[in-house]
Image: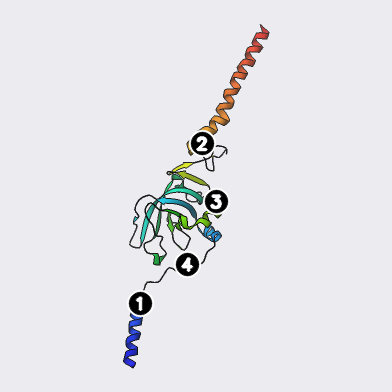
Amino acid sequence: MKARLLTLLAIGITGFAGTEFACLCDDLTIEKRVNQADVVFSGTIKDSPWNFSEEFIAAGFDVKTVWKGADSFPLIEDGYVTVVTAKVSTACGVNFIAGKEYLVYAKIDNNGLYATTCAGSWFLDGRADDVEMLDAMGATHHFIDARQVKGSSSDDCRGPGPFTVKECEFEKLVRNVLLPVGIALPLVGLSVFFIWRKRR
């Protein structure tokens, strides 16, 4: 009987030692997810993920919307960023799949972005509540096919709109400088002409 108990105990210990621990996460509210993240954005994985190291993989994202972090991670304004995560879900790695759209809560690590499921990174269609709150908070950058778009009504060219940053800046130049000058010059010319006529 004693030998049997020892055998069962040995089997139990061996089985436990060979079992991988599951990823255990705190139950974060959306507000905590946003506050703890350095960068929050949505985007689509452009190509197949690749091995970043023995324990991590990386994926390149075409960025769609940025809600937080462009000031601290300006590379995201290029419309394409690389994000690193653990290879396995038991280490809280995000399931990166090419062509899928994600909501990413990332930390800045060694000038790069690192994401985990615990921080809230997951498929975008599974984060509808997060997106609703983030949109209420306000996005800072929008992209179409990795091309940043900005509004034209604001002096700092921020917000969504049909123009790229350069197009917005040019439109602002036309609206604020060239157009007023174009209107003022003919009026000044007419005034000078009439004054000249009267003095003749």
* 3D distance between C-alphas at marks 1 and 2: 60 Å
Q: Residue furthest right?
A: 198
Amino acid type for the residue under numbered disc 1: Ala
Q: Foreground: 100 or 11?
A: 100
Q: Looking at the image, is mark 2 or mark 3 nearer the viewer?
A: 3
Going by the numbered disc 2, the residue's amino acid type is: Cys
Q: In the rendering, at what x and y percent does residue 103 appear?
A: 47, 55
List the residue tagged with mark 4: 25
The answer to whether marks 1 and 2 mark residues whose Cβ atoms lie closer than 8 Å is no
On residue 17, which mark appears?
1
Can you say which quadrant of the picture contains the C terminus?
A: top right
Q: Are marks 4 and 2 in contact (CB under 8 Å)?
A: no
- The CA distance from mark 3 to mark 4 is 25 Å
Q: Quadrant of residue 85?
A: bottom left
Q: Residue at x 65, y 9 (%)?
A: 197
Give the alpha-carbon distance from disc 4 to disc 2, as whole Å. Answer: 43 Å
The label on residue 168 is 2
Residue position marked by numbered label 3 in the rendering: 135
